């Protein structure tokens, strides 16, 4: 009898030991890991697909590694999608992003991260009304690039804007994103000079494709600039701009800027995994530094994608 009592005591002690150890281990787990453990198999699949899409079919990985301030993607606006789009590749991608963000918002959005803010607007974009913008933001990198180019941001958005207030503005779901390409190019990580040149090209295109006034001849024909496609500028009122400094005509300026431009991918070609795609107009030191950093971080992202526990390692990278 004493033997059985002693055996029961030992068994109870072992049970209490392992149970206490389990509770302690659970308590010392980081918050993100506890949230990961609460996901069911379907939710894990959605979140993993979300991360994989943002790293392979977008530029979110460069945001996570710190070389790119912001990455933006579009989710189909529910009110604008039509039957013919259902099942297409863009629609499936949109579903991956939408469902993945839903899981992120439910389990991880409230957990602080110094490397990544994932946010989504609560309304369609006022210019591209078929889409709702989903954004990955590296707060430290965004504040850095805004700080380095603050006079430009203040010139467009007002002298009261600060790097921190711009971060708050961008992450506010109720606010539209700014549509000035100089600012957009800077906070997307393309470099200030490249953004300025592209903005100038954009203004010329805006004049070419905006509504014409009598005698109603197409502006691109009148300006002798080739028609490059539809830019949606016909939805706005007539717009005119004068040739920039050192140019006598818009055609001369347009051709000059077009000839200057090269692709970032042409600068650093890669058959497996490409760096962010943007137009390079000037090889200043900032552009060189941006391209080199992208090239280095490309290898980090490739290694992360090869991890057998990709979901867990991605969350670890975000929160630790």
Image (spheres, rainbow, N blue to C red):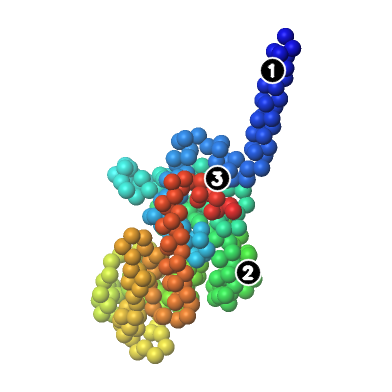
Q: Residue at x 46, y 60 (%)?
A: 300
Foreground pick, 95 / 60 = 60
Q: CA distance from mark 2 to mark 1?
A: 69 Å
Residue that badge 2 annotates: 162
Q: Residue furthest right?
A: 2
Q: Is residue 56 above or below residue 193?
A: above
Nearer to us of marks 1 and 3 is 1
Foreground pick, 38 / 19 = 19
Callout 1 environment at 10 Å: few (<14), some (14 to 19), or many (20+)?
few
In the rendered structure, are the residues bearing label 3 and label 2 in contact, judged by CB atoms less than 8 Å apart? Answer: no
Q: CA distance from mark 1 to mark 3?
A: 49 Å
SS for callout 2: loop
Q: Residue at x 29, y 44 (%)?
A: 84
Q: Residue furthest front?
A: 3
Foreground pick, 310 / 63 = 310
Residue 232, image quadrant: bottom left
Residue 79, image quadrant: top left
Q: Position of residue 136 (x, y in %)?
A: 50, 56
Residue that badge 3 annotates: 105
Q: Residue at x 39, y 55 (%)?
A: 56
Q: Tag 1 or tag 2, which sits nearer the N-term?
A: 1
Q: Residue at x 60, y 40 (%)?
A: 34
Residue 192, disc: none
Residue 7, disc: 1
Foreground pick, 114 / 126 = 114
Q: Position of residue 29 (x, y in %)?
A: 63, 43
SS for callout 1: helix
């Amino acid at each position: 009898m004493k033997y059985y009592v002693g055996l029961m005591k030992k068994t109870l002690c072992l049970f209490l030991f392992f149970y206490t150890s389990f509770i302690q281990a659970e308590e010392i787990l980081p918050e993100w890991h506890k949230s990961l453990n609460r996901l069911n198999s379907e939710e894990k699949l959605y979140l993993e697909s979300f991360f994989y899409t943002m790293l392979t079919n977008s530029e979110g990985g460069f945001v996570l590694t710190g070389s790119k301030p912001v990455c933006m993607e579009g989710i189909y606006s529910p009110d604008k999608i039509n039957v013919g789009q259902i099942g297409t590749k863009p629609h499936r991608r949109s579903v991956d992003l939408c469902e993945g963000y839903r899981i992120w918002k439910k389990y991880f959005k409230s957990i602080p991260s110094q490397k990544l803010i994932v946010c989504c607007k609560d309304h369609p974009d006022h210019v591209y009304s078929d889409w709702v913008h989903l954004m990955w933001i590296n707060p430290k990198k965004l504040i850095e690039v805004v700080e380095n180019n603050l006079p430009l941001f203040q010139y467009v958005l007002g002298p009261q804007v600060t790097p921190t207030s711009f971060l708050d503005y961008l992450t506010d779901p109720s606010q539209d994103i700014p549509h000035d390409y100089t600012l957009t190019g800077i906070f997307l990580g393309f470099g200030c000079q490249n953004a300025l040149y592209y903005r100038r090209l954009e203004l010329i295109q805006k004049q070419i494709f905006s509504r014409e006034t009598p005698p109603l001849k197409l502006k691109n024909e009148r300006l002798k600039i080739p028609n490059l496609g539809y830019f949606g500028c016909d939805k706005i009122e007539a717009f005119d701009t004068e040739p920039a400094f050192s140019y006598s005509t818009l055609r001369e300026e347009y051709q000059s800027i077009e000839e200057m431009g090269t692709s970032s991918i042409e600068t650093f070609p890669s058959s497996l995994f490409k760096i962010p795609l943007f137009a390079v107009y000037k090889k200043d030191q900032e552009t060189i530094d941006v391209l080199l950093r992208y090239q280095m971080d490309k290898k980090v992202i490739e290694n992360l994608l090869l991890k057998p526990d990709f979901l867990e390692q991605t969350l670890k990278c975000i929160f630790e």
